[in-house]
Amino acid sequence: MGFLADALSRVKPSATIAMTQKARELKASGMDVISLSVGEPDFDTPDHIKEAAIDAIRRGETKYPPVSGIVPLREAIVRKFKRENGLDYKPSQTIVGTGGKHVIYNALLATLNPGDEVVIPRPYWVSYPEMVALAGGTAVFAETDMAHAFKLQPEELERVITPKTKWIILNSPSNPSGAAYSHAELKALTDVLMRHPHVWVLTDDMYEHLTYGDFTFVTPAQVEPGLYERTLTMNGVSKAYAMTGWRIGYAAGPEHLIKAMDFIQGQQTSGATTIAQWAAVAALDGTQEHLARFRAAFQDRRDLVVSMLNQATGLKCPMPEGAFYVYPSCAALIGRKTEAGKTIETDEDFVTELLQTEGVAAVHGSAFGLGPNLRISYATSNKALEEACTRIQRFCASLR
Ligand SMILES: Cc1ncc(COP(=O)(O)O)c(C=O)c1O
């Protein structure tokens, strides 16, 4: 009420940012804190990408960009989708935004009317429901469970679709669970969507390049070409190129949708930073050699963390296919007491006590819509991970 907008009351603060902040405060007070709550690679942006940005500054690429993105980047995006996903788009079917988050938000702003529903599988990336709410739509949650590795099942998708459904957001590999859909698993979902021609698909492919073992990434419009006309394929450079601070995301889809997003962006940001866009051209068109290094490091850490967490009393941790998160259940520890006599009633209690007694920061699963779990980011050194998991084991063993 009063001076601030009512829209603020529709939005929750980000639990991941809150946990990172809490960890930072404890660290500042002198505690030895290991943060497993961050959502970004610990690697540096590859040098050839930085050089491209420096060159762009020297060439004077410092004026307003076209709203939807500089032509060389839109062309590089077209090449990327063709080369990596077998998808044909024209440059006019692409748009560049200030991070993947901004692209998703604009797609929702450009399409949602009051009463429109957006299907979001749980556990979800924290921003989806909030962005839907800000854009005036209604989030409708689809349930998953650990027995199905947190992957949406076709029957559940069928159950949640109504005549008001406008979008489904599909995020694979997933933040927070790391789960990624195989071709067959995704096809089972796109088969359902083919029976509901009013439902559009918003893919969040941010973690496309971070998959492990022999897993092969696929995206909905590739698996089911029949969905091409109602799919927005979203991706970005933040995770695969360690470029979270550059703030470049992009998407491709039907031209009328891209035009609507361009229209909003024109009155909003007037397009993403030119220098970062030139860096993104180098990221997409340049050598992908660093990816093998990133993947090998992340796979090694995933294996370490899953193994050590499964040795902790009461934790159960599935082995995810991608991203840099694991999502163990702490269900067996709910109801137990800490040495100080505090009862662990929720996963939020679990992560709070873990941070206070052992100085390990994780995020509670209920913040992502499914608990009692915790999300652990393994985008940090093996040494820190080993120490953190040892502390988690000690904490779990201390609960009575
Ligand atoms: C699933 C998912 N989608 C989108 C984003 C946003 O990416 P960007 O940093 O490019 O806005 C993130 C970042 O954490 C994410 O985890």
Image (cartoon, rainbow, N blue to C red):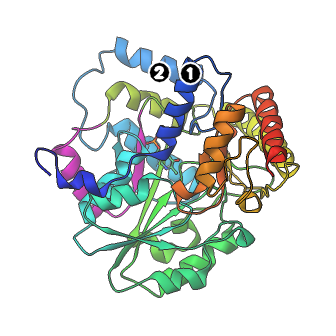
Answer with left or right where residue 144 lies relative to residue 133. right
For the residue marked with disc 2, what is the amino acid?
Answer: Ala
Was residue 268 drawn as part of the magenta stretch in this picture?
A: yes
Dot label at residue 229: none
The reply to whether callout 1 and callout 2 are in contact (CB within 8 Å) is yes
Q: Secondary structure at mark 1?
A: helix
Q: Is residue 45 visible?
A: no
For the residue marked with disc 1, what is the amino acid?
Answer: His
Answer with left or right where residue 182 lies relative to residue 94. right
Stretch in magenta: 247-271
Residue lying farthest front?
Answer: 341
Q: Is residue 286 visible?
A: yes
Task: Note whether 185 is above or below 311 in the view shown.
Answer: below
Tell me which residue sits at (22%, 70%) in the image: 113
Tell me which residue sits at (40%, 38%) in the image: 73
Was residue 204 drawn as part of the magenta stretch in this picture?
A: no
Task: Note whether 388 is above or below 58 in the view shown.
Answer: below
